[in-house]
Amino acid sequence: MLAPPPPAPYHYRDVVTLSPLKRIRAVPRWRRALAFGAAVLALASCRSSDTIVVGLAGPFSEARGLSMKRAAQMAAEEINRSGMLGGRHLELRIMDDSANSARAIVVADSLRQDRRVVAVIGHLTSAPTLAAAAVYNGGSSPVVEISPSASSPDLSGIGPYTFRVCATDLAHGTALGQYAYVRLGVRHVAIIYQNDDYGRGIVATFRADFLRRGGTVDEQDPVLGPETDATPYIERIQRAGTAGAVMIAADRATAVAVLRLLRQHNMTMPVLGGDALTGIQDEGALAEGVYLTSNYLPERPGPVNAAFVRAYQAAYGGDKPDHRGAGAYDALHLIADAVRARGADRAAIRDYLASIGTAGGPPAYDGVTGRIQFDAGGDVRDKSVVVGVVRGGRIVLADTP
Amino acid sequence: MTFADRFRLSTIRSRLALGLGVLVAGAVFGALFGVVALRSMSNEIDAELRSLREVSRLNAAVQGGTLNTIATAEAYLASPSPEIRERLAALSAETHALRLQYRKLSELTPDERLLIDSVSRLQSALEVEYGLAHAMADLGHTADARAMAARARVPAGLLTQTIRTLSDRATARANAAAQSLQDSARTRELLLLTLAAAALVAGIAFSTMTLRAVQSPLARLVRSAERLGEGDLRPVEHGAMATEFAVLAGAFGSMSARLGGIVRNVVDESERIAGSAGDLSAISEELAASSGEISTSMIEISGGAERQAAKLTEAGVAAGELQQAATANAEAAGRVAQLGGEIHRVAERHQDDVRGTLSALLELRGVVQTSAGQVADLARSSEAVNDFVALVKRIASQTNLLALNAAIEAARAGEHGRGFAVVAEEVRKLADESAAAAEQVTETLEFVRRQIEGVTRTMQEGAQKVENVESVSEGAARGLDEIIAAVAGIEEAATNVSDAAGRNRRAAEAIQSLAADASAQGTKHAAAAETVTAAAEQQSASTQEMAAAASEMLAAAERLRKVVTGFRV
């Protein structure tokens, strides 16, 4: 029961990931310049003028990255088919960050150095997005990153080149706090959170709302991920017996691990989580009844979304897209619009995105995730989230207050 | 195209202004560059220092926060309390905020970001492990809690190490920044020096250019002025020069041009005057001569007029005589015509008589010609006698010669030869007698011959005369015809003469009256000519005075020309 948790090899691994960069740095400057010049020449001689490259960064080796990748590819095909870029071919440079912030920094650096890359869609989760944001915003030629689903409130205003098409945890956490207190009538809540930017962000917003309403947070226990054995926390919550609900502020895998422990301890109180839990409905009975927020559901009404979902299902064997896919789909269309309007220039694309919906700028964009129009912090204004619940392997709209 | 042209440095002012401008611009630019360089360096230093301060502050804060977290967490293990948990939560939030600040530092390199990420993860791990330890402690699993807390020292140690690495990185970055600042300072220093050198070179270049632009035109202008002083007024090409000098040169040029023009005008005028004076002089001389001639002519005219008057009077008389002669002529002609008519008639009457005489004469000629032939035969016979006489004479001469020789021989022979001498003498006498007889025959023959010759001549004359008579009678006949024709011509001529005489008379009458008029006019002419002569003499005097004045003028013009030829134009 109290078996020591497995060693944490990532501590070392993350430090070791420095080595490729170190190797680059070890090369004398003049040779680097030479290599860079050669690369630039090579890039210039190949179809740099008729190819628009957009970076796509996310945990594509994992299930949560799948919809994002598919939707982005679908959008790229649509854009190329439509010829809206005047014969120029839109190409995705897909890079896997494994939802790891260290990996994300390396990926971001690589994408930013690639002069062909005019913009980046990514990253999927909050911690890598936050870690990479400084990279995308830095240097002599910053590049736009549009995250489809990173919700951390810390991301707001982190840099002029950082945008996201999803709602922030301020919306998610507040919606959850309200739902728990008002709809579920919970007054005491225990929080198990993933001790990273995402988990801390959504906990902070949930906690603020819940406390404001008069609720009490009994516990607030950090985990690193699914590898952390949260048994002590669960037992403590069980022993205290006051918690009317458990808020799992973590990604799907971690949430599944925690949920499994809760079920093992026959704890049946309601479980709530953020949109990071999306996909948990595939866990069968375990996930039944879990509440989770989302700023996008495939059932979202409107012809634009209906067409998108239809096309997605047709392309990928009936699978439905998730909010990450929808976000990536909208993000790529936004970038294509910017390129068409202002050319394949990083700064021009950034200016185009910032001016959407402003006086003199292009009109607000009606995407599959709703109307998109960025505020000064790079967030989408008035992005509402809904609370869903897993019923029979599907996320359905929970009865909203 | 020169540098000066290209930059329109056409005036000294612009050259000076440009030169000074370049120097001032160089100085200002250098100063600005220095200020900007200093400011940017101080900004860089500031930024670097700020970043370093921030990094070290954050490093210290993170380190402090970590130590605090560890201390507080350990304290909780010793004596759990809600306050300590609250403090731990607060510390966690604080560290999170610190990390966020750390991340937002823009001057970080990717590996520094990775280190910060590591710090973040290690802190997360630390918090998770202490959180688990606390939960175990709360559940009463003290030993497990301690074991878990012990495990937390691994990330704690790594954390300290990583933070130290971060500090090292910051230090290295500071060193690198210092080095790069030093490098950039050196570069800027070099740039400033280069700028100063460029300004200096530009200054020297402009000074030299300006000096050259002043000196060379000045020298050229001085030369021009000297030439002008020497009286050389020919236009001078000064070449390209600064506008100020060009204006001066232009003034020089126009001055010398105007002077030259004046001198040229004076020279022309003096030449023209000299020419005119010469002409005048010549003309006045001619005039003087002409007036002399005129006066002479006038005198002649005067005389001539008088003579003419006399002559004309004579002419009048002559014309009168002519008139009379013409009248007489006419009358004579009338008489001639009358005579002609008479001659005509006589000639026609004698024509038949002449023809009869002519035929008789022709018969006579035949007789004469026959007689002439007989006489000629006689003459030929007398000539044969002549030849015989000549032979006798030749023999007699030789016999005489022989007798002479015999006489000489006989003399030599003395007595013996006396007889012989007598014979010889006798022979010689014979010879002489023969010769004399021959001479007598010759004389007789001569007489006969002369008789024959006389007859022959008479015969010939007669024949000739008969012949002449023939031709004369033919001529007479012809002459009669001619006379008849001539008489007709004379009659006509006489009529003509008569007419002409009439006309002559009328003409003479006209001449007479004209001559009378002319005579009167001539008298008048003579008077006028005298007046003209007087005037011509006066004119001559004036002309001579004029000639004198003209030669004075010529001399003056000559002097003037000598004066102005001192100038070269």
Image (cartoon, coloured by chain):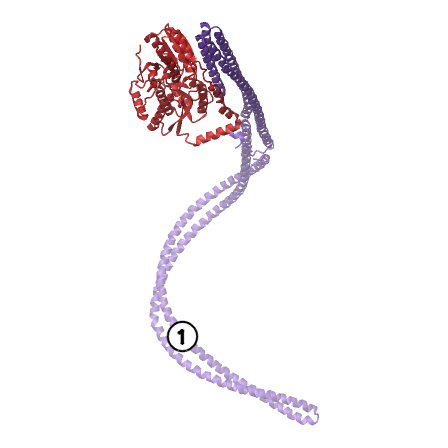
Chain colours: A red, B purple
Q: Which residue is mark 1?
A: B469
Q: Is there any visible trace of residue B41 in the rendered image?
A: no
Q: Position of residue B496 (x, y in %)?
A: 36, 58
- The answer to whether residue B107 is left or right of residue B562 is left
- The answer to whether residue A52 is left or right of residue B220 is left
Q: Please state, as top left, top right, bottom left or bottom right, where the N terminus of chain A lies in the image.
A: top left
Most foreground residue, A186 or B186: A186
Residue A254, compared with residue A77, is above or below; it is above
Q: How many marks are shown on the rendered structure?
A: 1
Image-quadrant location for residue A288: top left
Most foreground residue, B361 or B53: B53
Q: Is there any visible trace of residue B514 in the rendered image?
A: yes
Q: Position of residue B515 (x, y in %)?
A: 42, 48
Most foreground residue, A147 or B74: B74
Image-quadrant location for residue A73: top left
Element at label 1: helix
Residue A201, compared with residue B256, is above or below; it is above
Label 1 is found on which chain of the structure? Answer: B
Q: Identity of the amino acid at label 1?
A: Val
- The answer to whether residue B108 is left or right of residue A149 is right
Q: Position of residue B57 (x, y in %)?
A: 52, 13
Image-quadrant location for residue B232: top right
Q: Position of residue A320 (x, y in %)?
A: 32, 21
